[in-house]
Amino acid sequence: MPYVPQGRACYWGGWGGSLIVMDLDTRTTISYMMNKMAPGIIGSDRSENYVRAIQSCLT
């Protein structure tokens, strides 16, 4: 997944677009759980936008 940080990071996606990213290098955990299901099992466009916005605040 191109928007998951490189380095010491792991992620897990859930059905409908939910996503959690744990980045040990920045000591950050990002969790996204939506209230409206979307297709897919590893994130969605909405979760990607959310993760990218948080990462831009950290850099």
Image (cartoon, rainbow, N blue to C red):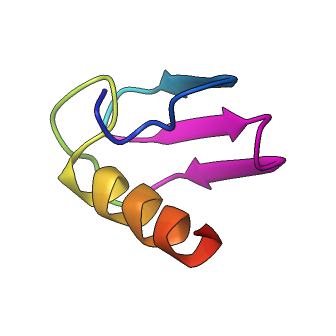
Spot occupied by residue 41 in the image (x, y as percentages of width and height):
30, 23
Image quadrant occupied by the N terminus: top left
Frontmost residue, 43 versus 51: 51
Q: Is residue 3 magenta?
A: no
For the point 69% across and 23% down, which residue is it?
A: 8
Spot occupied by residue 2 in the image (x, y as percentages of width and height):
28, 33
- Which stretch did the figure color magenta? 17-34
Frontmost residue, 52 versus 41: 52
Spot occupied by residue 10 in the image (x, y as percentages of width and height):
62, 22
Any part of residue 35 in sight: no
Locate residue 12 relative to residue 15 in the image: left or right.
Answer: right
Locate residue 58 relative to residue 45 in the image: left or right.
Answer: right
Any part of residue 45 in sight: yes
Frontmost residue, 8 versus 1: 8
Spot occupied by residue 49 in the image (x, y as percentages of width and height):
30, 63
Locate residue 24 relative to residue 53 in the image: left or right.
Answer: right
For the point 58% across and 69% down, which residue is it?
A: 59
The number of numbered discs placed on residues in the rendered structure image is 0
Locate residue 56 relative to residue 38 in the image: left or right.
Answer: right
For the point 44% across and 27% down, which residue is it?
A: 14
Q: Is residue 31 magenta?
A: yes
